[in-house]
Image (tube, rainbow, N blue to C red):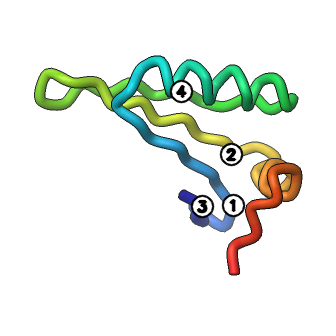
Amino acid sequence: SIYFDRGYKMVNFTTVIPSLAEDVIKMINFLGFKPTIYKIKKNEKFRHTIRISKNAQEFLNLIHADKS
């Protein structure tokens, strides 16, 4: 998801699949960004949220994620 929080653009990716979360984190790091990772347990499963808050627009430009 792409959203604004307190006037800043943010990018979130959420999954319950641990290996997918790990792959996404590796790809974001490879591109030179430092995501924040949250792991929250709910109903015996973990939800992995990967957030890019710093340089989010630069990240979106790099991956060509135009929100129209």
Residue 8 is marked as 1
Under circle 1, the secondary element is strand
Residue 2 is marked as 3
Does the CB distance between marks 2 and 4 fall below 8 Å? Answer: no
11, above or below 3, in the image: above
Residue 45: where, in percent of width, then height? 21, 24
Under circle 4, the secondary element is strand
Residue depicted at x 81% and y 51%: 63
Q: Observer-nearest residue: 7 or 33?
A: 33
In the picture, measured across the screen, residue 55 lies left or right of residue 50, that is right
Mark 4 vs 1, N-terminal side: 1
Q: 10 Å neighbourhood of mark 2: few (<14), some, or many (≥20)? A: some
Residue 65: where, in percent of width, then height? 74, 61
Residue 2 lies in what quarter of the image?
A: bottom right
Amino acid at the residue labelled 3: Ile
Q: 10 Å neighbourhood of mark 1: few (<14), some, or many (≥20)? A: few
Does the CB distance between marks 1 and 2 fall below 8 Å? Answer: yes
Q: 10 Å neighbourhood of mark 3: few (<14), some, or many (≥20)? A: some
4, above or below 36, in the image: below
Q: Quadrant of the N terminus?
A: bottom right
Mark 1 vs 2, N-terminal side: 1
Mark 2 vs 4, N-terminal side: 4
Frontmost of labels 2 and 3 is: 3
Q: Which residue is mark 2?
A: 53
- For the image, the number of numbered tags is 4
Amino acid at the residue labelled 4: Ile
Q: Observer-nearest residue: 26 or 41?
A: 26
Residue 51 is marked as none
Q: Observer-nearest residue: 66 or 53?
A: 66
Q: Which residue is mark 4?
A: 37
